[in-house]
Amino acid sequence: MQNYYQFIIPRMNGDSLEKDFPRYLGLVRKGIGGFILFGGRLAVARRHIRLLQEEAPHPLIIASDLERGVGQQLRGGTDFPPAMALTSAVAPEGTGSIRRKALSMLRDSFAAVAEEAAYCGINTVFAPVLDINTNRRNPIIATRAFGEDKETVSFMGSEMVRVFGACGIVSCGKHFPGHGDTEVDSHIGLPSVARPLASLRRRELVPFKAAMEAGLPMVMLAHMSVPALDPSGLPVSLSEKAVSYIRDTMRYDGMLITDAMNMGAIGRYSEEKACCMALRAGVDLLLHPADTEKAVSYLKKARPKADASRIERFRRGLLSGRIQRPDFAFHKSVSDELFRLSISAEGLGSLHRPFLIVLNDDKEGRGSVLIRSLRHNVPGIRHRTVRQGEGLQGWTPPRDTDLVVAVFSETRAWKGGASTWLLRTMAGLDGRHSVFISFGSPYILDPIKRAAKIFAYGHSGPAQEAVAAILAGKTHSSPSR
């Protein structure tokens, strides 16, 4: 009988690795395909991944979402700028404006991600994001995409594929056939892209084709309805017609993996049935079902035909052996400089007695680094922090001050975009300020019409410090694209 464990990549929680290790070890002994790692400490993850590989009957696929580097998931790893920030640093006016020094740093950053991943024991990185930002109201892509045109996304994504490959790391392009032109977060519901196939070929599919030509080893299929590929409305991740298109028309023979099977986009089916449908469609790997044992039990009864030969060939090429400790200090210096180069602005002038308002759209309090840096650079600056749900009714800024509004709103799974509270609060401040700063998606500032704007793309400490230096007049930003 087919061993269906080999087709599944379940979740591994890094923060509870030691406590849950017996469960992960049990799955390894049953022949599990591998794991997707979330959170934890690098040293702990490294030790336990090595132990699991030593016990495994075959090389395990150890994957992780590292779009922003190992620091995105693991404490002790380096946190790099998101994709949109990298493009702003390297090619602020598109691929025709490439900064050669920054391009060298970009490649260094991709190599750093690969080196740190390999050191930890991660052999598969779910990146690059090959979606194109064609819809500014998209709640889940935004800063995760390299850009708004196929040329930029193709160039940047292919660079990542080539550098990862040279370092022995498997890259996984996502989210096929392109999640950029949607307004629904597939973690919550089923997005749909209703444009004709000819249009998809001219735009959305171009970065995927370019990455494939650069040696892309794996593609993640999106939980999206794309009638041009399957008129039935089935999510691409479960569609035999979509798989046939990528195999037969695009001539792609690499690995195909679903997006996470616990996402809301497949809600019309049970996870177990969806897993069965994906395998029957010809998908190679099932990512992150909520209950592995329940999924395997269903598959054993349904007995979908699934080809393990591609997985076996794939495993033979996975990186193995101990890796030398990376130069984390150098990696941080590259990251810090890319963050600095990425920041752009429009309409920014000198400030007179700035008063800082920090708007936090997430549970985590952000902005402490910005406040501390501004206090150091602008003596006597005053500030107020406002968290989600709190109001500013009746509040007016002190007289003879320039109001600076710092907006912290991260693009993240299950969030569904910026909250109505944040958008309402921002609208209430429009016209009563001098500067708006986005430490996240630049598109969130689209409704703001009467202010200078600074785009930082992410909330990291180096980004906040760089913005503080710009506000203090100590450095200059690049003009906005």
Image (tube, rainbow, N blue to C red):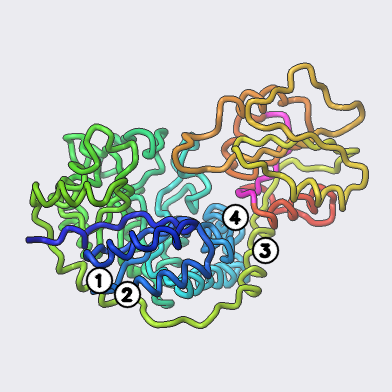
Q: Looking at the image, do the residues carrying marks 2 and 1 touch, with CB atoms under 8 Å apart?
A: yes
- Crowd tier of the residue under label 1, counting other residues whose Cα lies within 10 Å: few below 14, some 14–19, many 20 or above: some
As measured in the structure, the alpha-carbon distance from the residue carrying label 3 to the one carrying label 4 is: 14 Å
* Magenta region, main secondary structure: loop
Residue found at x 33% / y 70%: 215
Q: Is residue 386 magenta?
A: no
The three-letter code of the residue at mark 3 reads: Asp
> Could you tell which of marks 2 and 3 lies nearer the N-terminus?
2
- Crowd tier of the residue under label 4, counting other residues whose Cα lies within 10 Å: few below 14, some 14–19, many 20 or above: many
As measured in the structure, the alpha-carbon distance from the residue carrying label 3 to the one carrying label 1 is: 35 Å
Percent coordinates x, y for residue 417 in the rendering: 50, 35
Q: Which residue does the numbered mark 2 point to in the structure image?
A: 318
Percent coordinates x, y for residue 57 in the rendering: 23, 74
As measured in the structure, the alpha-carbon distance from the residue carrying label 2 to the one carrying label 1 is: 7 Å
Tell me which segment is drawn in magenta.
449-459
Mark 1 or 4, which is nearer the eye?
1
Mark 2 or 3, which is nearer the eye?
2
Q: Which residue does the numbered mark 4 point to in the structure image?
A: 88
The three-letter code of the residue at mark 1 reads: Phe
As measured in the structure, the alpha-carbon distance from the residue carrying label 1 to the one carrying label 4 is: 35 Å
